[in-house]
């Protein structure tokens, strides 16, 4: 079985734009659903709607893959599933390690979608000695002292960090030093990595804050007002001193797990 250390996707060398690469998993998810329903072909309009993009953009994206639909017939679903899976490097086995087996790490370990999408959880790693040997999702947790050996023994090139923010950079440095070249970061902090290492960041609190912004905007539109927060942001309209002081006090009280930033502050 091939591993991620010696086989990498060809998307960059073939000049596929990053924006297109980011949409390929959306197309693959929609196509997989069609395949499971035994749908043989799909039009660009139908697939674009299922993936949440416009059909012109979809056709442009597929042109980078050298895939063109047949007029009046559409795209062959099974062939597109194979083609996109190959471009994303999902036709091989990618061993993954998850570091930080708290609530989030355990939830990731129990996620059943990894195996069906070309990823194998090779190891679960945690710094708590009390966790060592405990099975999570049928995999015994190993201590961080063994991290480098685990990476080497399993040929791991993808690491998932689900630790507290304060430990994330140190874990990242050790993963990179051990040979990991791609990191999925769930810790609420920005990681510094050398050239050649890819990092994807997932911050649930930031996504919720963005949704809160849109909810506030919608509420303001319904009432015909921008809301007090928007009024305070207008030039020459400072926030009332009492409210500003209360906001500062609240920010001081809302310390995060590291005790230096509010827990909901964007990283």
Image (cartoon, grey):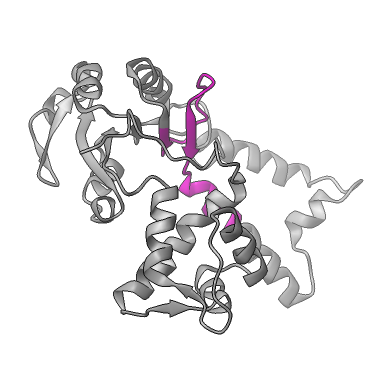
Q: Position of residue 237 (x, y in %)?
A: 87, 49
The answer to whether residue 255 shows anywhere in this view is no
Farthest residue in the bottom direction? 72
- Residue 205 vs residue 176, the one in the foreground: 176
- Count the marks: 0
- Residue 69 vs residue 107, the one in the foreground: 69
Q: Is residue 203 magenta?
A: yes
Q: Relative to 20, is 114 on the left or the right?
A: left
Q: Position of residue 5 (x, y in %)?
A: 32, 28
Q: Position of residue 194 (x, y in %)?
A: 52, 19
The answer to whether residue 180 shows anywhere in this view is yes
Q: Relative to 30, is 222 on the left or the right?
A: right
Quadrant for the C terminus in the image: top right
- Residue 88 vs residue 186, the one in the foreground: 88
Quadrant for the N terminus in the image: top left
Q: Relative to 16, is 232 on the left or the right?
A: right
Among the 4 quarters of the image, the one containing residue 104 = top left
Q: Is residue 31 magenta?
A: no
Q: Residue at x 37, y 15 (%)?
A: 177
Q: Which residues are magenta?
A: 183-212
Q: Residue at x 79, y 74 (%)?
A: 224
The image shows residue 177, relative to residue 49, as above or below, that is: above
Q: Residue at x 77, y 42 (%)?
A: 241
Q: Relative to 91, is 130 on the left or the right?
A: left
- Residue 199 vs residue 239, the one in the foreground: 199
Farthest residue in the right direction? 236
Among the 4 quarters of the image, the one containing residue 15 = top right
Q: Residue at x 25, y 27 (%)?
A: 155
The image shows residue 48, relative to residue 65, as above or below, that is: below
The image shows residue 125, relative to residue 12, as above or below, that is: above
Q: Position of residue 183 (x, y in %)?
A: 41, 33
């Amino acid at each position: 079985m091939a591993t991620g250390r010696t086989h990498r996707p060809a998307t960059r060398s073939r000049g596929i734009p990053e924006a297109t690469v980011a949409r390929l998993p959306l197309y693959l998810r929609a196509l997989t659903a069609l395949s499971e329903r035994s749908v043989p072909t799909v039009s660009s309009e139908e697939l674009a709607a299922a993936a949440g993009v416009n059909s012109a953009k979809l056709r442009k994206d597929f042109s980078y893959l050298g895939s063109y639909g047949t007029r009046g017939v559409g795209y062959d679903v099974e062939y597109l599933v194979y083609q996109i899976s190959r471009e994303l490097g999902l036709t091989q086995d990618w061993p993954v390690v998850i570091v930080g087996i708290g609530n989030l790490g355990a939830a990731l370990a129990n996620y059943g979608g990894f195996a069906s999408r070309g990823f194998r959880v090779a190891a679960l790693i945690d710094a708590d000695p009390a966790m060592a040997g405990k099975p999570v999702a049928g995999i015994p947790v190993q201590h961080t002292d063994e991290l480098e050996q685990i990476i080497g023994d399993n040929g791991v090139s993808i690491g998932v960090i689900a630790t507290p923010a304060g430990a994330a950079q140190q874990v990242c440095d050790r993963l990179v030093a051990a040979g990991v070249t791609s990191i999925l970061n769930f810790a609420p902090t920005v990681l510094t990595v050398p050239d050649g290492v890819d990092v994807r960041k997932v911050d649930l609190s930031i996504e919720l804050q963005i949704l809160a912004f849109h909810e506030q905007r919608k509420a303001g539109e319904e009432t015909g007002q921008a809301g007090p927060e928007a009024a305070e942001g207008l030039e020459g309209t400072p926030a009332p001193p009492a409210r500003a002081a209360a906001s500062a006090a609240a920010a001081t009280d809302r310390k995060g797990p590291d005790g230096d930033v509010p827990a909901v502050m964007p990283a």
